[in-house]
Image (cartoon, rainbow, N blue to C red):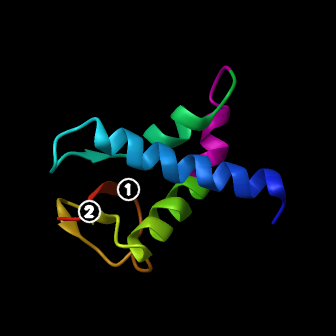
Amino acid sequence: MTDTERQTDRRLERAILDLLGRRGPSATICPSDAARAVYEGDGDGWRALMEPARRAARRLVTAGEVEITQSGRPVDPAHARGPIRIRRTR
């Protein structure tokens, strides 16, 4: 992993926590919210950050900071397929 990738990973983690910090305690965000917050450019280039944003969310799950949900219920990030939401750990 390059230094740039590591910096992007850290920025995505911070973006997730910052976005959640601005919302209510049970509010959720989509990984795309973090990808858009970190992407520096025009157009839809943020889409390339979607998988890194999902990985950042999984790292924050491991750290006990957030949980990943589907249909409003926490799910094991290793088994989550399809759209996910991220919320602060309750």
Left/right placement of residue 37 relative to residue 70 reads: right
The label shown at residue 83 is: 1
Q: How many marks?
A: 2
Q: Nearer the viewer, residue 39 or 10?
A: 10
Residue 47 percent across, percent down from the top left: 61, 41
Is 24 displayed left or right of 16 in the figure? left
Q: Is residue 74 above or below residue 26?
A: below
* Quadrant in which residue 51 is drawn: bottom right
Look at mark 2 in the image and give the residue it sits on: 70
Q: Residue at x 82, y 56 (%)?
A: 3
Q: Quadrant of the C terminus?
A: bottom left
What is the three-letter code of the residue carrying label 2? Gln
What residue span does the magenta drawing correspond to? 42-50
Q: Residues within 10 Å of mark 1 (few under 14, many from 20)?
A: few
Cβ atoms at labels 2 and 1 below 8 Å apart: yes
| Residue 30: in magenta span | no
| Mark pair 2, 1: CA separation | 7 Å
**Looking at the rendering, in which quadrant would you find the N terminus?**
bottom right
User: Sequence order check: which comes first, mark 2 or mark 1?
Assistant: 2
As for residue 48 lying within the magenta part, the answer is yes
